[in-house]
Amino acid sequence: MSQTWVAIGDLTDIPILGARCVKNGDMTIAVFRTTDDQVFAVEDKCPHKNGPLSQGIVHDNCVTCPLHNWVISLETGQAQGADEGQVRSFPVKMDGETILLGLR
């Protein structure tokens, strides 16, 4: 299955250590920016109780869910520590300052 790359905005549209949401059908995808301008995209629901990860705290290429403090890797979508579960992650690439989100 081939990847479709969709332009979703510029790097400066997302605050450092912040997130913006993109709709893909019924799914909401949270797009995060780290302090060193890396960009990651994961489904915007924690595997624990579907908390809005886009409203969580970004740190060390992870996000902490605002509901129950689960820590989710932005690189893999995998829950960290003793917690178990995973959210869907999406490939992201940059075209200059434009963020491209990989959808299938």
Image: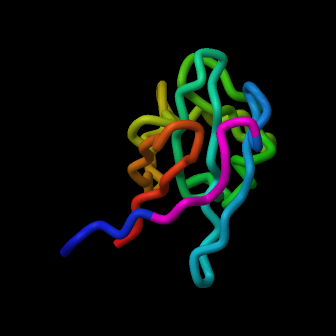
User: 82 or 38: which is nearer to us?
Assistant: 38
The image shows residue 87 at horizontal and vertical percentages of 48, 54
At which x and y percent is residue 69? 72, 34
Which contiguous range is marked in magenta? 6-12
* Residue toward you, 87 or 95: 95
* 2 with respect to 73 (left or right): left
Residue at the far bottom in the pictured view: 25
Which residue is the extreme one toward the front?
Answer: 96
| Relative image position of residue 32 (x, y in whole percent) | 64, 39
Quarter of the figure that contains the C terminus: bottom left
Report the magenta stretch's main SS: strand
Q: In which quarter of the image is residue 26?
A: bottom right
Numbered circles on residues, count: 0
Q: Does the magenta stretch include residue 3?
A: no
Q: State the residue at coordinates (55%, 60%).
A: 7
Occupied quadrant, residue 10: top right
Quarter of the picture holding the N terminus: bottom left
Name the side, left or right, on which 31 lies relative to 1. Answer: right
- Name the side, left or right, on which 87 lies relative to 48: left
Does the magenta portion include 9? yes
The correct choice, above or below, for 58 with respect to 41 in the image is above
**Which residue corresponds to the image point at 57% horizontal and 46% vertical from the top-left?**
98
| Colour mapping | rainbow
Q: Which residue is drawn at 36% across and 69% down?
A: 4
**Vertical placement of 10 versus 58: above or below?**
below
